[in-house]
Amino acid sequence: MRIRALESSRRPPVPEETFPIPADGPFALLFLRTRIIGERLNEDEEPESKPKPKPTATEATTTGKDEVNPNPAQNEEIDWEYDD
Amino acid sequence: MTKGDEDTQPLILILSHRDDSTARRVEEQIRQRNHHVLLLDTADFPEWLTLAATLKQEHWQRTFTSDGMSYALSSIRSIYVRRPNHYQVRGDFPETLQVFLENEANHGFGGILRSLDCLWVNALEAQRLAGYKPRQLHIAREVGWSTPPTLITNDPLAVRTFFFEECQQEMIFKPLHGGFFLGRGSSYHVIYTSRVTLDHLKELDRVKGTAHLFQRSIKKHFEVRATVIGQTVLSVAIESQLSEASSVDWRASYKDLRYHIYDLPERIKEQCIQLVQRLGLVFGALDLIVTPDGEYVFLECNSGGQWEWLAVETNLPFAQTLAEVLITGKS
């Protein structure tokens, strides 16, 4: 059974299949990106000229490294409906 | 409390699903202060939640039962709306009937909750209205915020003019609402705030397809997530400019972000609180830019914004502050 957020009739339905990004949809869809929950961006995306930042608490303790702990960053992704 | 007894001590209700670690943090803080708190998911109604509400004279006499415990709804002092799921009617019904039955549950249980004289963090209707970015920006200007020059349109010519004349080719696009679509498994589609380039202008005719929001790109020194909880502002600087991946929209690359506690000027704190209050909210997470010139620019207010990861990073007392507000029942 589909679960939706409280009174959130606006929430788009969860698709049965991953849908292809339409090639000629509205302008907004030019910026649609497909990602995997918890994925890390390719290191190549970081400019070499900038120093690599030190790890933070989120990264060290909760990001994809301890399945027991909830991952706040992922939680934010999943809870996007309320956070925009 | 014992089974079947009504409890008349003040009760704080947290509406969320049971796996919500953020809600659990607040629940724990309330318990540590020796107050009664109940984490409730509205999806439990009607199967696991029982409601009996009788209107006698001018007052509703109401109880609800959860996990064998009975509570007087009149004892609820405050309600924290986190991530509750929609009421769920279980059974093999056609979708039309399913929707009708779930709406009945909403208007029954939800209607009773709305009739309570208590503090809501946040009131559902206010939260919904606060989600409209054009309204946020309008109110932000009214309370004195600096905001990026903004265009909302489905007119390609208006975008072209805005791009060259108002933005000098430094323009971003951001969704008006959402922009996050779950896919199958662990994949999802997302639209982040994105820079619009000359190449994108070749596709401008596609702007006709729906409403689009464009803003002049504001130079960032760093960003601030200012979380308003009642009269308190907890603000964290987000260093988003260390990497290209997080420079336009910091949500696009959490691994590139660094955080530190940041004390906003009093005037800016006041503006944060004023904006949240004008939106009819008690809680609001504001996204701000601090420019290289030290100007504070308002981007948006998230009425249900996340804060747990910032609590992990900074040890700022988000859960404690929420618990205090909920316990006092006053914003």
Image (spheres, rainbow, N blue to C red):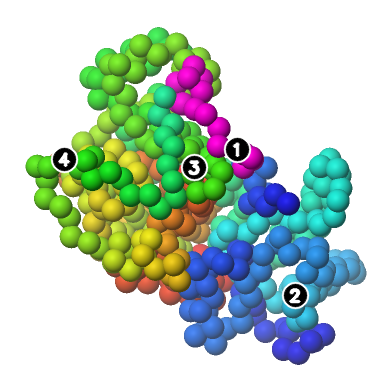
Q: x and y percent of residue A63 in the render?
A: 36, 61
The reply to the same-chain question for discs 2 and 3 is yes
Q: Which residue is mark 4?
A: A47
Disc 1 crowd rating (10 Å Cα; few below 14, some 14-19, many 20+) is: few
Task: Tell me how far mark 1 sits from mark 4, CA to CA.
Answer: 35 Å
**Position of residue A11 in the picture relative to residue B219 (left or right):** right
A1, B152: nearer the viewer: A1
Task: Tell me how far mark 3 sits from mark 1, CA to CA.
Answer: 11 Å
* Foreground label between 4 and 2: 4
Q: Which mark is residue A17?
A: 1
In the rendered structure, which disc, 2 or 3, sits on the residue that comes first in sequence?
Answer: 2
**Vertical side of B171 occupied by B156: above or below:** above
* Foreground label between 3 and 1: 1
Region of the chain picked out in magenta, as a range:
A12-29
Tell me the amino acid under the disc marked 3: Tyr
Chain assignment, label 4: A
